[in-house]
Amino acid sequence: MRTPALACVIVLLAASAVPAATFQVDDTGDAVDLTPGDGICATAGAACTLRAAVQEANALAGDDRIRVPAGTYALTIAGAFENAGATGDLDLTGRLRIVGQGPEATIVDAGGLDRVIDVRPGARVTLVRLAVRGGKASNTEVGGGIHTDTSSRLVLERVLVESNEALVGGGIGAGGRVKITASTVRDNFAEAGGGLLTTTDATIRKSTFDGNVADGILEIFGHDIAATGPATVTIVNSTITGQIQTSSICRSEPVQSTVGADFVLSNVTVNDVSNIVRTLDSCTPGEGEGTFTLRNSIVQQCNATLISQGYNFVQPEGCGILGDLTGVVVGDDPLLGSLLDNGGPTQTLLPVAVSQAVDGGNPATPGSGGFACEPFDQRGVARFLGAGCDMGAVEGH
């Protein structure tokens, strides 16, 4: 005979074991699901479109999955401010993994109709091997390609985010935590945060940001990445061809002030880092400014004070550098090649053989902890030691 306590445990376990559903998309059209929540992805024409699969996944509990074959999935149903996935962008509300066949093969394109994907409150979403393209948010919305709510979580794995537009966060507008791995964010446009704008913690690994543009709001640009705090943005083994920027606003009324985000860079190649503090009245700036802490990295331009953890290549002589200056090279050209396919899932900037960045990194064994170089580079190639590993995102020679 079961005791009441044991029976209660069994009921709770049974209730928590919600089965996951997998939906196989078989039509590139944009028709809605006939009966969301019946567990069957089927439009009136008996097809499973991406939108219909999203509606079914939203209506069901559990960790659901949508498999999307090669093709271009154009969003064509107008209705920008609806939040159930029936019109406009694809609203994602639950725990969901959407898997394509590769960013060159599986393309979700909003064609300027709306943003592409909206990760709604409480959602946990992973996007894998697909492209997010052609999104355009209204002037009251954040995130042209992808938007995340403050209580949501987003993971991108081998995703291409390109040619999207918004007032802020052209490619991605992140209010909730975001993790970007082996992905490319390029050719997006905004007033601030052309590629990514984040107001919370973000992690970027083995990824490339390129060709993103921000026109600027109150001196705040962040062509590739713009961030405000309180937040920490961690960038590892990544290539940023434009600008990353942390910004804060200083007002005498603290409730109206904002603080900057803190960037941590490990084996990163970045063109420009910038720290902007907007002083709008008689307040004293300084408190709440964002920071840039870096190791084994290459910086070609800056408008910030850098906190070194050793073995960095900083091209401009006028850039302020604090912290550990061991192995720091200042005022020279890192001699990087063009952005090319040098292997791996993303394009990279390879230093030429005579660059001081080659073997200029920390001489400790890569991956051994502390401030040693990362064990693998952006392409997934094992780092090796000469006098040291290579500074920047790529172990070139």
Image (tube, rainbow, N blue to C red):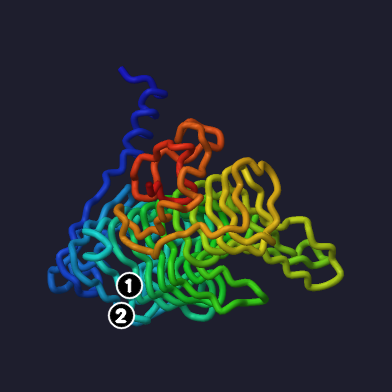
- Which of the numbered marks, if any, corresponds to residue 26? none
> Would residue 65 be found to the left or right of residue 326 on screen?
left
Instruction: Let me know if residue 141 appears in the view.
Output: yes
Inter-mark Cα distance, 1 to 2: 8 Å
Instruction: Establish if 19 lies above or below 204.
Output: above
| Residue 23 x/y as whole percent | 21, 56
Q: Residues within 10 Å of mark 2 (few under 14, many from 20)?
A: some
The quadrant of the picture occupied by the N terminus is top left
Q: Amino acid at mark 2?
A: Ile
For the residue pair 291 and 198, the one nearer the viewer reads as 291
> Would residue 14 be found to the left or right of residue 27 on screen?
right
| Residue 52 x/y as whole percent | 25, 67
Label 1 sits on a secondary structure element that is: loop
The reply to whether dot 1 and dot 2 touch (C-beta < 8 Å) is yes
Which of marks 2 and 1 precedes in the sequence? 2
| Residue 78 x/y as whole percent | 34, 82
Q: Which residue is mark 1?
A: 86
Q: Residue at x 21, y 59 (%)?
A: 101
Q: Amino acid at mark 1?
A: Ala
Label 2 sits on a secondary structure element that is: loop
For the residue pair 236 and 201, the one nearer the viewer reads as 236
> Would residue 228 be found to the left or right of residue 250 on screen?
left
Question: Looking at the image, which residue sits at the far left?
Answer: 46
Q: Which residue is mark 2?
A: 77
For the residue pair 89 and 388, the one nearer the viewer reads as 388
| Number of callouts | 2
